[in-house]
Every structure is written in C-alpha cells, then in structure tokens.
Image (tube, helix red, strand yellow):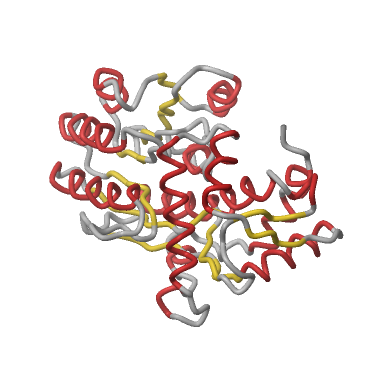
Amino acid sequence: MTKPVLVTSAAGGRQGKTGRHVAEMLLKRGVPVRAFVRTIDERSERLRALGADIVAGDFLDIRSVQRATDGAGAVYFAYPVQDGLMDATAIMALAARQARIPRLVNLVMLQSSPDAPTPRMRQNYLSEQVFEWAGVGAVHIRATVFYENLAALVRQSLPAQGAIRLPWGSEKTVLPLVAGEDVARVAVGLLTGPQREPGSAVRLIGTTISLKEIIATFARVMAKSVHYQEISDEDWRSHAASRGYNPHAIEHLSSLWRAIRGAAIDPNDPRYAVTDAIETIGGAKPKSFEAFVREGQSELLAKSA
C-alpha cells in the first residue's frame, strides 16, 4: 500500500485508544500513516517520531477532514463518545467519497440497531447507513465494552477504597468485554487484508465474565481485598459528571448499565461467545482480562485525582 491510511483519533482518547494502537501497528508493518489529531502535543509528536504524517484537524470541520482524506488510500474512523457523531459521519462520508477512498473501517458498538438500548448505539446504526450510502467500501467493527473503559471506572474508587462502586446489580451480572488492543489488531487486518464486502460487520467479544470474576481478578492481581458496592444510577451519573464525563457519554453509559442489568446475560449464550475474528483477522488470541489487569496494575493502583 503506497497511499497512507488515515487514522482518526490517533493520539488516543479516554476509551480504548484504538486509533493510537492502529497507527502504531500500521507503522510497525511499514504501512504509511496519516494521523488525524485534534491538537499537536507530546502524543502526536511521539507518533511523528515513529514516522506518521501528523494532520491536526476537527471531525466537525469539513475543510480539515477534506485535507486529511485527500490522497489517502483507506480510513479508520473512530469517533469519541461525545456529541456530534452524525455530523462527523456525514463530513467524513462526503470527504472520503470525494477523495475516492476505497476502504473505510468504522468502529461502532456491539449492538447497532434502530432499537438498541442506548442513544449512542442507535446513532451508530445510522452512521453505518451513511457510510454505506457513500460508497467508500465501509466495513463496521462492532465491539463490546473495552477493558480500558472498565479500568477507568474501577480506578475511581478501587485504589482509595478497595471497592468497585458501580450500578451493575449483583455480583452475578455478566459482561462481554474486549481489549482495545485486540480491536485495533482487527482494524489493521481489515485495513490491510483482503477487501471485505462493503456493509459487512465484524463482532468483537474477547471474554464474557461475571462481576464476581472481575472482582476476584482485581483482588488476585493486586493482592488486596476488593469488594463490590452497588450504587444507584443517579449516584453514578452525579459522580461521572464530577469526573468530567460529557453529558452524551453519561447518558450512553447510564442506559448501558440499565441494559446490562436487565439482560441477565448467560455466559454460555452463543451470542456472547468469544468471537474468532480476533484471531482470524487480528492474528492473535484475545487478551485475557487478567493479563490486561496485570499489565496495567501500577496505573490501576494509582489514586485518581
């Protein structure tokens, strides 16, 4: 591939940092990368040092997106969990169509449908349709909750209180999870491997694990007592707002917690089985939750401000 891959959210955000992983993985393969970042800072400079072409811009500024797509050979589109997804989708779809982009990998959430349980998931479904109408070879990655998201939530109370304080119901609650790194590896496979049928979707689940198992994993890795403290949706929303979560993310996550509590997921349900795409497309077996916790142990134990 001689034309660069345009990687959005390349500096890395507060979700799974998949854009960052995708950019670094492509560069390691010798694939030219054009990294689309919001600001020039130490994160973008590290990517530049690895060989990426850095383009500063805004998802919602059509001129900067047009400049970024011009001359690109493929696009990785990962919009953060905040307002503006539909505008950003329309802008990228137009710019990619004008630039004759033949392949676009679109990151969305596991459930993407008109009747999905959160407003963000419903927007993801509409985003998929727009990219498909644009005729830019769109393929969708439908990924479940990232390990990284769970770690960020747990870090708010675990170091200081030894507690996981979340509105997830009982310890029997089961969650499908995946490592952001595994999602990125699949994205790289889709960007560089054989072209897939436009409009196709790849589901990604790395593990299906109970809250009880999650608590036991943290306790085992950190060699400390860990307990679960259930809080109300209202308490969680208030706490999330105080931590700087934007209203769009708070509404999405609040709806997601209610959906997870009500779903009563059976870990043996084939709909929530580990998906083989992580290995067949991404090239490696899914990272286990315990391996992820061990890798990030020092960060997880640091008291958040």
Q: Residue furthest bottom?
A: 268
Image point (35%, 60%), residue name:
111
| 264 on left or right of 221 | left
Of residues 248 and 96, the one nearer the viewer is 248
Image point (64%, 60%), residue name:
230
Image point (79%, 62%), residue name:
219
Of residues 166 and 77, the one nearer the viewer is 166
| 143 on left or right of 140 | right
Residue 112 x %, y %: 30, 57
Name the quadrant of the N terminus.
top left
In the displayed structure, would residue 282 be above or below residue 99? below
User: How many labels sit on residues?
Assistant: 0
Q: Quadrant of residue 144?
A: bottom left
In the displayed structure, would residue 64 be above or below residue 34? above
| 89 on left or right of 23 | left
| 281 on left or right of 168 | left
Image point (57%, 21%), residue name:
45
Residue 263 x %, y %: 44, 71
Of residues 101 and 245, the one nearer the viewer is 245
Residue 188 x %, y %: 43, 49
Name the quadrant of the C terminus.
top right
In the displayed structure, would residue 18 be above or below residue 39? below
Of residues 42 and 302, the one nearer the viewer is 302
In the displayed structure, would residue 182 be above or below residue 57? below
Q: Quadrant of residue 277?
A: bottom left
Residue 240 x %, y %: 56, 40
